[in-house]
Amino acid sequence: MKRTLVLLMCCLAMAFASCHKDPQPTPENEPANKRFIGFYEGNIYLNGTANAPQLAQFNMPDGFPIDSMMFHLTADITAGDNDETANVLFTIISEPENQSYETTGTVSGNTISFGDLSYHYVEGPSTFDVTLTLTGNLNSNTLTLTGPATGTGKVNIEGFPVSLDLTVEANVDGSIIK
């Protein structure tokens, strides 16, 4: 009887020992890109200088400040080919139609480095081609975007036979929220 009781207690102890939950995923063992996956929306701002060297011949300054030029932006971030990459569809919300750009991102901790984004901007008869090199830092559900922006363009002033070649050097700063 003692032996049966000891055997029964051993079986009961084995049953309790084998009934444990599998460990839940933690930030340490989940894919690095998982925390970035989702849909974000917010604003980014350009601050810098636009230069038009042709204005020097008219005794005018060749540099004009770009002060908080705002762009409304969305980002749809999905898993990439591996745990450290993400696919990103950035959309700049603008009239008359939105412009979307695909790129990839490389994840390291709470930082994601995006591939270059080339943006073609049209305002009236003027056109600009700007390249943004963005980095995002994730804090909770907010992705803070920073990085340089460089570009060139042609400014045509309606009613005047003037066309200016423009170069742009600026910095991007802004936040998009999941």
Image: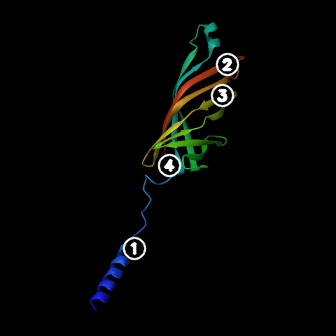
The mark that comes first in sequence, 1 or 3, is: 1
Q: Does residue 91 appear to the left or right of 143 in the view shown?
A: right
Q: CA distance from mark 1 to mark 3?
A: 66 Å
Which residue is tagged 2?
Answer: 165
Q: What is the secondary structure assignment of the residue under circle 4?
A: loop
User: Crowding near pointer 4: few (<14 within 10 Å), some, many (20+)?
Assistant: many
Between 24 and 169, the one lying in front of the other is 24
What amino acid is labelled 4 in the image? Answer: Ala
Q: Position of residue 129 (x, y in %)?
A: 66, 29
Closest to the camera, between mark 1 and mark 3, is 1
Element under disc 2: strand
Rendered image coloring scheme? rainbow
In the rendered structure, find residue 128 and report the number of the disc placed on it: 3
Mark 2 Cα shell of 10 Å, populated few (<14), some (14-19), many (≥20): some
Which numbered disc, 2 or 3, marks the residue that appears first in the sequence? 3
- Between label 1 and label 2, give the one nearer the viewer: 1
Q: CA distance from mark 1 to mark 2?
A: 74 Å
Q: Amino acid at mark 1?
A: Ser
Q: What residue do we see at 68% from left, 28% from top?
A: 127
Q: Which residue in the structure is indicated by mark 4?
A: 32
Of circles 4 and 3, which is in front? 4
Residue 134 visible? The answer is yes
- Towards the viewer: 143 or 164: 143
Residue 32 image offset from top left, x and y in percent: 50, 49
Q: Is residue 46 visible?
A: no
Which residue is tagged 1? Answer: 18
The mark closer to the camera, 4 or 2, is: 4
Q: Residues within 10 Å of mark 3 (few under 14, many from 20)?
A: some
